[in-house]
Amino acid sequence: MNGIYFTEEHQLFRESLKDFLQKEVVPHLEKWEETGTIERFIWKKFGEMGYFGLATPEAYDGMGLDLFYTAILLEELQKINSGGLAAAIWAHVYLAMTHLNKNANDDQKKRYLVPSVHGEKIGCLGVTEPFGGSDVAGMRTTAIRKGDNYIVNGSKTFITNGVYGDYIILAAKTEPSMGNKGISIFIVDLKSEGVTANKLNKLGWRASDTAELAFDNVIVPAENLIGEEGTGFGFIMEAFALERLVMGINAHARAEYALDYALQYMSERETFGKPINQYQALRHKFVDLYADMDICRQYNYSVVHRMEKGEYVVKEATISKLKSTKMADEVIYNCLQFLGGYGYIEDYPMARMLRDSRLGPIGGGTSEILKEIISKIVIDKKEYRPASVGTNKKQEILK
């Protein structure tokens, strides 16, 4: 493993995590994949081990560790071959909890962040809507102030943990006429009256629950507003960098797992008196795939390092997701081919990996959207800036 970024403590953490996953998680994966339900007991176990609090300060029962611990958690979750479980975990920790960690006040953190660290509450993020995926400013969900409450109406879709979760970090327009400057963020209990969830039937990520949510005159206490009114767009844009880097790391890790599995198979599978890893056509193809994976892996580590230092790596994180998810799809497609007919059989891991990986270039911003963001930065020389803390102008600025 790369000694530039990972210390001995990181390696010990990785080994402990591997052991935990093999003993506590892997025996249940097939059941969760079949039922589409991750049983609640495992959330508590993750919480007991501190895995949900890696990036949370100790003041809120977290561990306050560097981002390479996060990278290790993401990598090892990919290597037990359940994209659905991995998605449910990182949607909780790095979508919902990110907003609580960075932007919630002390009372909100005590009510939602601390239970999330312990696995007692499961969170999700609600930005995408049925009528506009990547068009955040075009969202239609509204939250209208009425006394000490907000009344929420609208819908969200493709919400991981939206069926069985406990709360949602919800983006809604408090001033519909103001475009992205009228967006605010709320913590909404999913058991609130007026919230309904429809579980979506997906191609992959079968273990996770993905919902289309409807909000019909849902009453949300004003104390559940995160930050100030109108600051939501900035919060969302700032969080996108971490989300995209998370998906880039996921991609290189699942590609690495696919290559490891394929190589093991190729060393054991014989034709015409020799293992198939001795055929030049297959060896050279494998090397090309491995090189692509390793390039993405090293790039992603460098972006983690820069983010850990406090740099605003919106361009780099976007590139991470764009290139790594495409690479992972190509690697897994070809690794399935290495297995021949067995690659097409559900008893082998590649069929599930192929389905699970396909979401990579779609979720968290499609590859087409990411290319346009990078075009604005690289070609048009426009600059994304981080949100300005402590003002009611907390917007990510594209100058």
Image (cartoon, grey):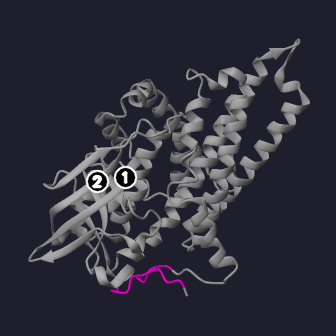
Is 355 situated above or below 62? above
Residue 106 x/y as whole percent: 25, 69
Residue shown at 49% from the left, 84% from the top:
397
Q: From where the camera sits, is residue 261 visible?
A: yes
Relative to 389, is 195 on the left or the right?
A: left
The x and y percentages for residue 195 are: 20, 54
Indicate left or right for 243 with 254 as reference: left
Residue indicated by mark 2: 213
Which of these two is toward me, 95 or 76?
95
In magenta, the rendered stretch is 386-398
Return the x and y of residue 16 as percentages of the image width and height.
50, 37
Q: Position of residue 128 (x, y in %)?
A: 40, 61
Q: Quadrant of the C terminus?
A: bottom right
Q: Residue furthest front?
A: 131
Residue 317 visible, this angle: no
Write the residue at 61% across / 71% down: 372
Q: Are marks 2 and 1 in contact (CB under 8 Å)?
A: yes
In magenta stretch: residue 212 = no
Q: Residue at x 43, y 56 (%)?
A: 94
What's the amino acid at mark 2? Leu
Q: Secondary structure at mark 1?
A: strand
How many discs appear? 2
Give SS at disc 2.
strand
Find disc 1 in the rendering and name its residue. 159
Chief SS of the magenta region:
loop
Q: Residues within 10 Å of mark 2 (few under 14, many from 20)?
A: many
Depicted 349 relative to depicted 5: above or below: above
**Amino acid type of the residue that numbered disc 1 sits on in the rendered structure:** Ile
